[in-house]
Image (cartoon, rainbow, N blue to C red):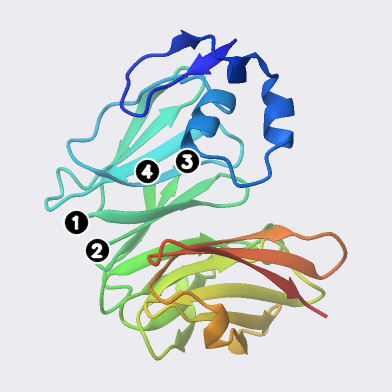
Amino acid sequence: MTANLPVLGLSNKESTSTEDEIAPSAFLDNLTSPPLEDHLSRYTLSPELEKLYAHPSDIIAVSTSHSGQWIASSCKAATPANAVIRVFDTSTYAEIATLQSHGLTVTKLAWSPDDSLLVSVGRDRQWTLFDTKTWHVKKVMPKAHARIIWDVSFSPAELGYMFTTASRDKSVKIWGGEKWDCLATVKFPESVTSCTFLYELVGVMTFVAVGLENGAIYILGCERDKGHWRVIHAFVERDTPSETVTAMEWRPCGGEGRYELAAAADDCSVRIYEVIIS
C-alpha cells in the first residue's frame, strides 16, 4: 500500500490497486520508459516538513546555506519594503532575520563556502554582502552593473572570498579583495543570465561557466592570483539551448579533471555536459 497524491489534491489517501501492491523500488526499477507523473507521485512522494510564510508576493530566489542551517528567500518587489531577504533557521523554521538593502526584486542569493557571508543581487543593479554572524550589511555596491544583475556565485574556498556576477549589460564581473573591488570584467555578445564558479581549483586554474540570453554557454578560466580572465571554451551552437540559460551547476564526474555541467533553459530543457579539464 502506498500514498497516492492526486494532481490537484490537497491530501493523501490510501490506494489499494494491484499496481500499488508492488514494492516501490521494484516497480521503478522495472520501468522501460521515463516515469509518468502518476508514478512519481505514488512511488517517490516525500512528506512535507514545513511551510514558510512571510513574503507578500511571488518567491523569486531561495538558497540554503552549505551547512543546511539557514534558508534565505526573496520575492518579487517594486518597493524597498518588499525587496527584503528573509532568513529562516532550519532547526525551528522560525524567521531569524529580515535583511534590507535593495530597492527592487532580489534575483539571486549565494553563500560563501564557509557560510560567513551571504551575497544578494537584484534588479536595482546592486549587490549587497551580509555578515551572517550579525546579519548586518558588510558591503553595498550600488550600480555594480549598468543593467539588472541576474546571477551571482562564490568562488571556491582556496581563492579566498571572491564572487562573480552576471548582468543584462552583457558582462560578467569578478569581485574580491579587502575592499571587494571589481577585479575583472569580461564582455559577451549577448546579455548574461547565469554564472557559476567551479567548486574547486584544477591545478592553478579556476573556472566559471557562463550562460547567455540566446542560449550560448562559455567557460572562463584564470590562473590563481593572476587576475587575467579569458574565454577558454565556447560550446558549439548545436549543443546549446535555443533560449535563455536560466541556471547552471557543476558536479564531479569521476576522475581528476572530469566534471559534469548541468544547464537549465527557457526552452524547457536541461542539458548535461561532460567537461574534461587537462
Which of marks 2 and 3 precedes in the sequence?
A: 2
Give the spatial CA distance, label 4 vs label 3.
Answer: 7 Å
- Residue in front for this viewpoint, 126 or 260: 260
Residue farthest toward the right in the current orientation of the protein: 255
What amino acid type is highlighted by mark number 1?
Leu
Disc 3 from disc 1: Cα separation: 22 Å
Q: From the image, tell me which residue sits under label 4.
A: 136
Which residue occupies the extreme front position in the image?
Answer: 18
Residue 87 appears anywhere in the view: yes
| N-terminal-most mark, 4 or 1 | 1
Q: Secondary structure at mark 1?
A: loop
Q: Is residue 198 left or right of residue 175?
A: right
| Marks 2, 4: nearer the viewer | 2
* Among the two numbered marks 2 and 4 on one chain, the one whose residue lies closer to the N terminus: 2
Residues tagged 4 and 3 counted as in contact (Cβ below 8 A):
no
Residue at image mark 1 = 104
